[in-house]
Image (cartoon, rainbow, N blue to C red):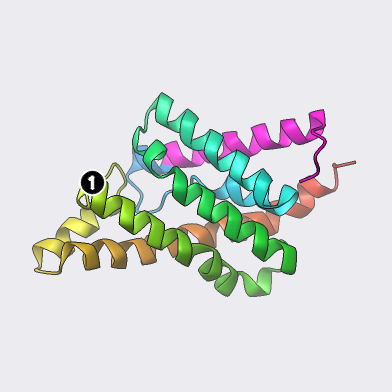
Amino acid sequence: MTKQFSAQKIALIALFIVINIVGGHLALYTRLPVYLDTIGTLLGSAFFGPIGGVITGVLTALINGATGDLFSIYYMPSQITVALMAGLVYKKFKPTDIKNIWWLALVISLPATIVSTIITVMLFHGITSSGSSMIVQVLHGMGINEVVAVFLVQVGTDYLDRLIGVYVVAIVYPVIHRYIK
């Protein structure tokens, strides 16, 4: 992201924040086992590098936290990790590279999964507002250690969430890019 903030960049970051908020609330209220609150963060990183993604992710967490999902504030480090990883990945690979989305999503997802697991276990003992908490409780009820249960669920749900996000970026990026001057 360049040092100069144009009205266009601010508007795009605002759009990406709205995408995160709508996706996050959709997942929260429908109890989906994915989060959908990092699609805009991924777009921010694709267009403006890691800093653009971090700005998008941090503002999303603050707004979501103030408007309905307090847990979002606690997971801000996960948003930041996604933004930084996506920014690095998108420096090396085109955001439109659809044939590599499987492993790009994995590279972006794994560090954030570790961060999310630590937050979920240490602060919330495996229970959060997301639909994936039900899966954690089932695994824990079957005798699986809480940390292992949270990590297994986080790996699956985070990866699926990032796969959806990276796919959306691959589709949406060229459409938005056409209109940027």
Front-lying residue, 176 or 129: 129
Q: Where are the magenta residues, as a range?
A: 1-26
**Quarter of the image that includes the C terminus:** top right
The residue carrying pointer 1 sits among few (fewer than 14), some (14 to 19) or many (20 or more) residues within 10 Å by Cα, namely few
Q: Position of residue 180 (x, y in %)?
A: 85, 42
| Residue 132 image-quadrant placement | bottom left
Q: Position of residue 56 (x, y in %)?
A: 60, 40
Q: Residue furthest right?
A: 181
Residue 15 is inside the magenta segment: yes
Q: Give the residue type at disc 1.
A: Phe
The local secondary structure at tag 1 comes to: helix
Residue 178 is inside the magenta segment: no
**Residue occupying image coordinates x 81% and y 44%:** 2
Main SS category, magenta section: helix
Side of 94 relative to 60 (left or right): right
Q: Position of residue 44 (x, y in %)?
A: 66, 46
Front-lying residue, 11 or 62: 62
Q: Is residue 176 visible?
A: yes
Side of 100 relative to 146 (left or right): right
Side of 5 relative to 44 (left or right): right
Q: Position of residue 6 (x, y in %)?
A: 82, 32
| Residue 92 image-quadrant placement | bottom right
**Above or below: residue 121 compared with residue 40:** below
Q: Which residue is mark 1?
A: 124
Front-lying residue, 165 or 42: 42
Side of 108 relative to 129 (left or right): right
Q: Residue furthest top?
A: 67
Q: Is residue 94 visible?
A: no
